[in-house]
Amino acid sequence: MKKISIVIPVYNVEKYIYKCLNSVVQQTYSNLEIIIVNDGTKDDSMTVVEKFSKTDSRIKILNQENNGLSAARNKGLELATGEYVYFLDSDDYLEKEAISKMVFKMDEYGSQIVMFNSYIDYESYKEKYIEFNKIITLSGEDFLQTVIRKRIYKPTVWSYFYETAYLKTNEYQFQNGLIHEDEEWSIKVILGANKVTFFPEILHNYLKRMNSITSNKKRSKKSITDMLFILKLNEERVNYHVKIKKTCQDLFTRQYIDLFFQYSNNKKEYISLIKKYEINKKIKSFRSIIKYYKYKFFYRRLK
């Protein structure tokens, strides 16, 4: 039985970490290396973790000062000794057979990355994350083009299961200090893979809570600055992939549009960034996307 590493960064999640860890230790797949990276948590999260560690020798704890989610994931990846690795957020949780099914699909298709479906847990109800029910197995480049065209591409790192050697050999790292770090990570990691598989089974539960980093970033100036930086990086990256450049540019343009609308109340504050990244020029070159989104007033505003 192959060893599987599960990396769980922990920061101020005392209300949620029990459910997360319990879902991991109760997995039907037993050969696990559970790496907890304490990212300087200020609450009692680690008290819960330490109780689990006393009865489960598979749990390894690393304590560090607060350096952010990316740094914690990078440290966990550095420590991972399993053949495959999975990054789980500490307020999310897994279905009981999740790891078994991830391993089975990875081995069945000989993939370096496996993507699967999740539930979004709103605490009072759940909904499927991806509405698509077919298996896809392609090279990284073709996979990315296909999932973007089918509008099922998700950058969220917890949607993927990775071959550890693939990540380490290519020295893939999460960019430290960024919000939206998954947006930068997933494009580069998928593009470099020889084979990526999507299968539609729901294996993971994403807890949608209002006080999370993701929920609080809407009006943050750092949020828009980081996302613009990542979009520029991703545009430069796909320039080397002529076959899928147009498809990826369509995705990036939609992201620019969504980003602008998210911050439209603060247009004056962000106008310098909009000019710097030439968002208006990018959008004007994609009239079909504007029509698709019915953002006609937005297009007029940029003339």
Image (tube, rainbow, N blue to C red):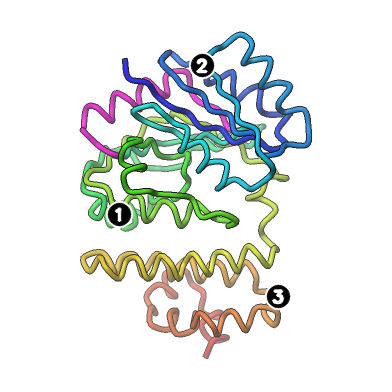
Q: Earlier in the sequence, mark 3 or mark 2?
A: 2
**Residue at coordinates 50% horizontally, 70% vertically from top-left?**
256
The amino acid pointed to by label 2 is Arg
Q: Earlier in the sequence, mark 1 or mark 3?
A: 1
Q: Give the percent coordinates (x, y) of residue 77.
A: 46, 37
- Mark 3 residue crowding within 10 angstroms, few (<14) / some (14–19) / many (20+): few
- Mark 1 residue crowding within 10 angstroms, few (<14) / some (14–19) / many (20+): many
Q: Give the percent coordinates (x, y) of residue 182.
A: 49, 51
**Residue at coordinates 69% horizontally, 44% vertically from top-left?**
66
Reply above or below: 202 against 191.
above
Question: How far apart are the alpha carbons under marks 1 and 2?
Answer: 32 Å
Mark 1 vs mark 2: give the one in front: 2
Label 1 sits on residue: 191
The amino acid pointed to by label 1 is Leu
The amino acid pointed to by label 3 is Asn
Residue 232 sits inside the magenta stretch = no
Label 3 sits on residue: 266
Count the marks: how many?
3
**Residue at coordinates 49% horizontally, 83% vertically from top-left?**
278
Q: Quadrant of the N terminus?
A: top left
Mark 3 vs mark 2: give the one in front: 2
Q: Secondary structure at mark 2?
A: loop
- Residue 58 disc label: 2
